[in-house]
Amino acid sequence: MTDIKTSIPDTSTTEASVACVVCLKEIPKSEAGSAEGTDYLLHFCGLDCYDQWQQKPSDSDTNKHRPA
């Protein structure tokens, strides 16, 4: 008779994961790049997403160009 093995992840050793702030891809926390702000910490899966995030205008930049 053949033994059938099932693949059940061991959650006791599973590393914590975070979502990339740009593409929302789940990545291990130890592999994530980050940018720190005064009140928050952002995680990125790679330099492409980090560069894309840097290119986006922030809300404060957008408000500077709005008519009063």
Image: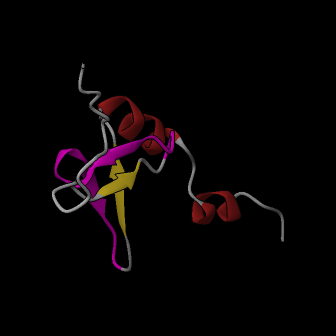
Q: x%, y% of residue 49? A: 41, 36
Q: In the rendered picture of this protein, how many numbered marks are placed on residues? A: 0
* Most distant residue in the bottom direction: 39
Quarter containing the C terminus: bottom right
Q: Position of residue 9 (x, y in %)?
A: 28, 46
30 in the magenta segment: yes
Residue 44: quadrant of the picture: top left
The answer to which of 34 and 12 lies nearer the viewer is: 12
Residue that appears at 32% across and 44% down:
27
Tell me the quadrant of the picture where the N terminus can be found: top left
Residue at position x 19%, y 62% in the image = 12
Q: Residue furthest right?
A: 68
Q: Nearer the viewer, residue 51 or 41?
A: 41
Q: Position of residue 40 (x, y in %)?
A: 38, 73
| Residue 11 or residue 68, whichever sits in front | 11
Q: Position of residue 18 (x, y in %)?
A: 36, 55
Span highlighted in magenta in the image: 22-38
- Residue 19 lies left or right of residue 12; in this view the side is right
Q: Dividing the picture into quarters, in which one does residue 64 lie?
A: bottom right
